[in-house]
Image: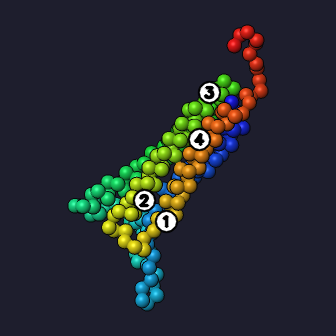
Amino acid sequence: MTRRSVYSAALLVFLAASALTLASIIIPRWISWDSQTASGTRIHYTYGLHKRCSSLTHGCTHFPEDEDCHGGDRYFCSMWRSVGFLMSFAIVMEGVTFIAFVVLISSGQQKRQAGWRIISAMVLFVGLIQCASMSLMAYLYENDDRFFPGWRLDTSWILCTISWSVMVLTAACISVSAFLMSPEGGYELIPGEG
């Protein structure tokens, strides 16, 4: 049976993974390219979910723009925007899961004993959403012509990968603890009544 301490520890790990998710969305470094000119000038491009940054302009612009999405590039834009949507959806689901954690931790023993199924399913679902986002980004990186040799998956992609891995592991730990841990102290059933 899952105890309050297990849920509390899982909530802390979940919040840390959620912070990684948020950072991966905010930091515009999903895919990057670095180069150096013959004169020694360093050129750096990064693509985030919603911004494209360049060391040449010393700033960031919204991405993808309408001009990035014509002809054959429509497929790329649809996939890129799908990753952005999935990551935003993951954040929303993380908020819902956080509320479920708080309700479960603050409720009675019976709800905690039965609630592990819901919480572990919600945490697993968030992890799978992020895994899908990470996979789509890796697919674009490997298959789109704009990412020629020299481009690399960067910090935000790594943060997303760590986040979904921790989420899946957390869901598994909650589920395992439900079967391996003894019931929480409290009232016991009267013999013959159970």
Residue at image point 45% right, 76% down? 34
Is residue 46 positioned above or below 69 on the image? below
Query: What's under tag 2, amino acid-wise?
Result: Ala
Label at residue 114: 3
- State the colouring used for the structure image: rainbow
Reading the image, the residue beneath label 2 is 138
Label 4 element class: helix
Q: Which residue occupies the foreground of this view, 99 or 9?
A: 9
- Dot 4 or dot 2: first in sequence order is 2
Q: CA distance from mark 4 to mark 2?
A: 24 Å
Callout 3–callout 2 Cβ contact below 8 Å = no
Q: Which residue occupies the foreground of this view, 52 or 7?
A: 7
Query: What's under tag 3, amino acid-wise?
Result: Ala
Spot the residue most to the bottom.
39
Specify the quadrant of the image occupied by residue 56.
bottom left
* Coordinates of residue 24 in the picture (x, y in percent): 51, 57
Label at residue 51: none
Crowd class of label 3 (few under 14; some 14 to 19; many from 20; radius 10 Å): some
Label 2 element class: helix
* Coordinates of residue 102 in the picture (x, y in percent): 62, 36
Q: Which quarter of the rendered picture does the N terminus lie within? A: top right
Callout 3–callout 4 Cβ contact below 8 Å = no
55 to the left or right of 100: left
Label at residue 154: 1
Is residue 114 positioned above or below 173 on the image? above
